[in-house]
Every structure is written in C-alpha cells, then in structure tokens.
Image (cartoon, grey):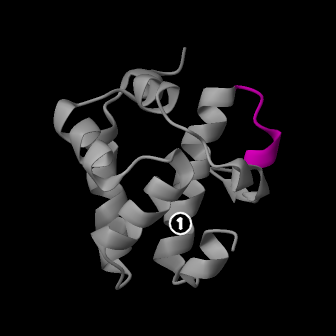
Amino acid sequence: MSRVFTASVASVYVHYVAKAERKGRTRADVDEVTRWLTGYTQAELDAHLAAGTTFEDFFAAARLNPAATQITGVICGIRVEEIDDPLMQRIRYLDKLVDEVARGTQMSRILRG
C-alpha cells in the first residue's frame, strides 16, 4: 500500500491550492475540479477536508465522474491512463486536473466539456 493512500486529503489539498494560487488561479478552481471528479458537493468536500479523511476513504466514498477516463497525460513521469491500481489512478487524476488548473487551461477543457 502506498503511503499516499493513508495521507489525509487536507494535507495535500493545501499544496494543490497553493500551486493554483501561485499561477493566478483560486481555491474555487481547485474545488470545482475536485467536485467534478468526485461527485461531491461543496459541503461534502469541505467536510472531508475538515475531518482529515484519507485518500483511500475519500475516493471510496466518491462518485467518480464517468468522463474521468478521458483524463490522460503524464504526472510524475507516469501516464495516468496506464496506472493499474484504481486508487492510485484516481489520485493521479486529481493531480493532473490540478496541474491543468495551474497551467491556466480553460475550465471547460479541464472538465472535459
């Protein structure tokens, strides 16, 4: 089991937000892509962040967007579409979406609209 599976989402989320803000985007942008991927409402997302939910539990309770399989590309030198472990793939999907936010990609493209 990867160490990231037992890490709290909130402990990494602050880094997602900081990365987006350094590039002129907002926490709202990060929240939007996270909600799109997981199917959580803002209240549910906030509750998970406040509770210190692990990535394992966070994605176990999520209603993954069916369009998530359209997320492709390289993150940490690995193609996200080729990751075998479903949980690791979902975590990397989120990483990839946050990278796209930070790069300034249009939200409609990020959300595979």
Q: How far across and down, in percent of the image, does residue 68 sit?
A: 69, 51
Compared with residue 106, is residue 1 higher up or lower down, i.e. above or below?
above
Q: Is residue 49 rendered magenta in the image?
A: no
Q: How far across and down, in percent of the image, does residue 61 sit?
A: 46, 28
Residue furthest top as drawn: 1
Q: Decide if residue 62 is on the left or right side of residue 26.
A: right
Quarter residue 27 falls in: bottom left
Number of labelled discs? 1
Quadrant containing the C terminus is: bottom right
Q: Visible in this render: residue 79?
A: no
Residue drawn at the location 22% of the way across and 39% of the way down: 47
Compared with residue 113, is residue 47 higher up or lower down, i.e. above or below?
above
Q: Visible in this render: residue 64?
A: yes
Give the crowd class for mark 1: few <14, some 14-19, many >=20 residues within 10 Å: some
Q: Nearer the viewer, residue 64 or 21?
A: 64
Quadrant containing the N terminus is: top right
Residue drawn at the location 32% of the way across and 50% of the way down: 13
Q: Which residue is mark 1?
A: 99
- Magenta residues, start to end: 78-85
Residue drawn at the location 26% of the way across and 54% of the way down: 14
Q: How far across and down, in percent of the image, does residue 6 sit?
A: 39, 21
Compared with residue 40, is residue 33 higher up or lower down, i.e. above or below?
below
Q: Amino acid at mark 1?
A: Asp
Quarter residue 67 falls in: bottom right
- SS label for mark 1: helix
Quarter residue 9 falls in: top left
Q: How far across and down, in percent of the image, does residue 106 sit?
A: 57, 85
Q: Decide if residue 98 is on the left or right side of residue 50.
A: right
